Image (cartoon, grey):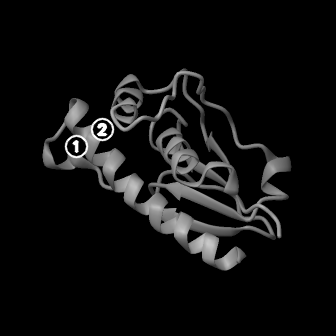
Amino acid sequence: MTTPSVPFVCVKNGGKSQMAEGLMRKVAGDSVEVHSAGTKPGGGVNALSAEALLEVGVDLSGGRPKPIDPELLSRIDYVITLGSEAQVEPVDGPTFENWNTDEPSERGIDGIERMRLVRDDIAGRVEEFASRIRSASS
């Protein structure tokens, strides 16, 4: 039995993909090899994303935005993009999924409240995904 592997990808790798990576580590522990990356990495992790995750016991303080690693893409099982703006060139092997996550700013919700809603949406998707890949690998 091999450990399933997944990178979560957004554009800047400063918010949503970092959240998904941290939440997956919390949910799955070592049962999933998890990464995050950006198609155009930004300069740092979004402070409000980090604050919203700390509220649920996930610490992003060691995180930093990073680009997609082509070697990683060649050996992983799944690629999850967060939002339609993140485009990853398809490669043979992994299963690609896109999560069009909640965007509260479109409803006029900003700041920490926005990040909590984004976090909760991603958390639900991560839990469902972790359950699905556990079933597939057993």
- In the rendered image, residue 4, in percent from the top left (x then y), is placed at 73, 63
Q: CA distance from mark 2 to mark 1?
A: 10 Å
Mark 1 closeness class: few <14, some 14–19, many ≥20 residues within 10 Å: few
Relative to 63, say whether 29 is above or below: below
Disc on res. 59? none
Q: Quadrant of residue 87?
A: bottom right
The C terminus sits in image quarter: bottom right
Residue placed at 43% from the left, 27% from the top? Answer: 46
Please name the amino acid that badge 1 sits on: Ser
Query: Is 109 on the left-hand or right-hand side of 90?
Result: left
Query: Is 116 on the left-hand or right-hand side of 1?
Result: left
- In the rendered image, residue 73, in percent from the top left (x then y), is placed at 78, 55
Q: Which residue is more in the foreground, 3 or 75?
A: 3
Relative to 15, say whether 63 is above or below: above
Q: Disc 2 or disc 1, which is closer to the eye? A: 2
Q: Which residue is more in the foreground, 53 or 27?
A: 27
Q: Which residue is more in the foreground, 21 or 79?
A: 21
Relative to 133, say whether 34 is above or below: above
Task: Tell me whether the residue at label 2 lies in contact with that at label 1, contact meaning CB atoms closer than 8 angstroms.
Answer: no
Relative to 51, say whether 124 is above or below: below
Going by the picture, which residue comes out furthest to the left?
108
- Is residue 12 among what the camera can see? yes
Disc on res. 115? 2
Residue placed at 71% from the left, 74% from the top? Answer: 137
Of labels 2 and 1, earlier in sequence is 1
Disc on res. 105? 1
